[in-house]
């Protein structure tokens, strides 16, 4: 029984990490395909909208704009591989203050990351049996 | 893109995820999502109206 609990717990952690890395994939892996697809698409669309209107991603260790930059970076990291792809591909990296809506864009990207944290926690809770 | 469009998009994305996570069952999710969406837009309008009267 204890072994089963440990297996269930490690599965929940794996699923939670998977859900964090790819928005919606945790629910898809649980068989909740529609829920995962809609949630994942909403988060990716929010990130893309933010980048489209001039928002940029922050880096966690970079405190050039003050300590809040690190906090913003933690929010951005919530989008998992989307964040990593943007960082490695040089996409939405630089600030564009000349664009009127660029600050809103950065907020969109941060909130997309926070929403994915919530979605990943939901997948974790379902897998751990805390939620049906 | 206008500020209003952005507010609508923001409310849409957030309410979709909140509805998925916060309720079970299609009908319940739809009602909850619409309620959150309306609240976001309503509070947005209310704040915009209030800020309009503040002179600075």
Image (cartoon, coloured by chain):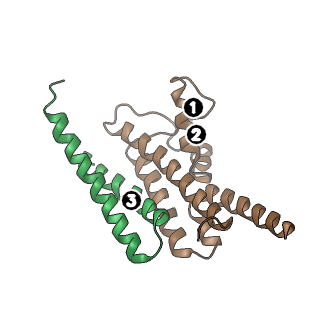
Name the residue rendered at 68%, 56% in the picture: A17
In the rendered picture of this protein, how many numbered marks are placed on residues?
A: 3
Chain letter for the residue marked with disc 2 in the picture: A
Image height of A98 relative to A52, above or below? above
Chain letter for the residue marked with disc 1 in the picture: A
Answer left or right for A19 relative to B16.
Answer: right
Real-space Cα separation, disc 3 to disc 1, in angstroms: 27 Å
Q: Are marks 3 and 2 on the same chain?
A: no
Q: Are marks 3 and 1 on the same chain?
A: no
How far across and down, in percent of the image, does residue A2 sit?
Answer: 85, 66
Name the residue rendered at 64%, 61% in the picture: A124
Closer to the camera, A8 or B41? Answer: A8
User: Which quadrant would residue A119 be assigned to in this image?
Assistant: bottom right
Q: Could you tell me if residue B2 is visible in this image?
A: no
Answer left or right for A118 relative to A17.
Answer: left
Real-space Cα separation, disc 2 to disc 1, in angstroms: 6 Å
* Number of the label disc, if any, that sits on residue A70: 1
> Which residue is disc 2 drawn over?
A74
Closer to the camera, B15 or A6? Answer: A6
Circle 1: is it few (<14), some (14-19), or many (20+) Cα within 10 Å? some
How far across and down, in percent of the image, does residue A5 sit?
Answer: 80, 66
Q: Secondary structure at mark 1?
A: helix
Marks 2 and 1 close (CB-CB < 8 Å): yes
How far across and down, in percent of the image, does residue B35 sit?
Answer: 31, 62
Give the number of the mark in front: 3 or 1: 3
Answer left or right for B56 relative to A35.
Answer: left
Q: Which chain is brown?
A: A
Image height of A5 relative to A57, above or below? below
> Which residue is disc 3 drawn over?
B15
């Amino acid at each position: 029984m204890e072994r089963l609990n440990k297996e269930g717990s490690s599965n929940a952690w794996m699923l939670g990490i998977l859900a964090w890395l790819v928005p919606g994939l945790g629910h898809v892996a649980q068989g909740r395909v529609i829920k995962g697809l809609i949630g994942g698409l909403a988060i990716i669309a929010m990130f893309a909208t933010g980048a489209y209107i001039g928002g940029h991603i922050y880096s966690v260790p970079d405190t050039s704009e003050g300590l809040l930059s690190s906090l913003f970076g933690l929010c951005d990291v919530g989008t998992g591989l989307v964040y990593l792809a943007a960082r490695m591909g040089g996409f939405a990296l630089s600030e564009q203050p000349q664009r009127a809506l660029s600050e809103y864009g950065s907020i969109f990207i941060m909130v997309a990351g926070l929403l994915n944290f919530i979605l990943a926690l939901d997948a974790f809770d379902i897998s751990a049996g805390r939620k049906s | 893109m206008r500020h209003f469009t952005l507010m609508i998009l923001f409310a849409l994305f957030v309410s979709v995820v909140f509805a998925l996570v916060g309720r079970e069952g299609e009908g319940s999710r739809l009602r909850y999502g619409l309620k959150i969406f309306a609240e976001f837009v309503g509070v947005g309008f209310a704040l915009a109206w209030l800020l309009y009267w503040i002179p600075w």
